[in-house]
Structure formats: structure tokens, C-alpha cells
Amino acid sequence: MIMRTQPLISEKYRSMQQQLHQNPNYGVASLGFAPLVAKIAKGLGLKSISDYGAGKCNLNKGLINSGLNTFEYYPYDPAFPAYGDPVPADLVCCIDVLEHIEPDHLDNVLANLAEITIKVGFFSIHTGPAMKVLSDGRNAHLIQKPSSWWLDRLIRYFNIEQLQNLPEGSGFWIIVTPVMQNS
């Protein structure tokens, strides 16, 4: 079990995220990435997947629909306390999550992701505004920065193995390995 002392989310923001998750159209991005994640997991022979920011566990459903049937699935989402703490896994997925993180907690979250990534991480990050807003009126994407800004932060914790821009400049997905693997 990972012992962390730094907070990953404030209680006020956790409550806002729980409200947003009541919207059936919130947290569905992982369904679109599931075929690619399944291909990565199969290709590398990865047996465990940690879904960081799992929401309604749509990634798990998408992976099964993509033919990936033999893997351990560990959801984590602070808006769903019943999932428990983040669990280390061969493949850590963080899909359409990092742009939603409170800026003053981002380094804590990235460090936590690095701690639980055993072999590979797959992250997708949107760089512009979301179509949804928080209950306090802010855009649901709290961090709207270009890929260069994100890369500067990610390389503190990860080696970049592959980066692919999303259509229309809306963001990117990235495959990473923990820095300690190549140290």
C-alpha cells in the first residue's frame, strides 16, 4: 500500500466532482481510449490496470468490450470513496483527469501516479476548456495549458515514450514510464 502524506484533492472540490459525476455524460472519455489501452496492455503483456480518476469505471467496460478479459482492474477516484486508495499496477491509466486537478495539488497527483506506475502509464490530457462547469461557475478543466507546459511537469516524474496529439489541437495522449526505471 502506498503511504502518501500530501493531499490529492480538497474536500470542497471532492464534493464538486461528486456533483458533476451525477451527469451521465461526465466521465465518458475513457470509452474512446479503451481500444488503444487494450492494444497497449495486450502488446506489452500487462496484467494489472489502475484506472486513476475512474469515475463510473467506463474504462473497465471499454476494455472488456475491446476483448481484454484477463487483467486485474483497480479503480481510484476521490469522488467515489468506496474504490479506496490508488493501487500500483503494471499499467496506470489517467484519462481526461489531469486537467481537472486543482493546480495546487497537481505535483502531489503526479508524484502519486509515478509511485503506482509499475511499468507503463497512459495519460490523456485536454488542453482547452471543457463543455461543463463546476457548481462555483469555473470551467471543469481547471488547468488549460499547452502540451509544452504539461511536458515540463511530466518529465519530473516520467520518461516520455510516445506522445500523440488529439484532433483539432484539443490535447494529447502520452505513454510514459517512471523515471526510476531508467535511472
Image (cartoon, rainbow, N blue to C red):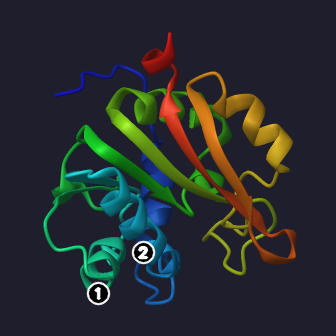
Numbered badge on residue 27: none
The foreground one among 181 and 51 is: 181
- In the picture of the structure, the residue carrying the numbered disc 1 is 65
The foreground one among 148 and 134 is: 148
Res 67 visible: yes
Picture residue at 50% right of the left edge, 9% below the top = 183
Quadrant that contains the N terminus: top left
Image quarter for residue 80?
A: bottom left
- In the picture of the structure, the residue carrying the numbered disc 2 is 34
Do the residues bearing badges 1 and 2 touch, measured as CB atoms within 8 Å? yes
Image quarter for residue 61?
A: bottom left
Residue 134: percent from the left, percent from the top?
A: 63, 69
Residue 101 placement, left or right of 142: left
Residue 138: percent from the left, percent from the top?
A: 73, 64
Res 79 visible: no
The foreground one among 148 and 55 is: 148
Picture residue at 16% right of the left edge, 61% below the top = 71
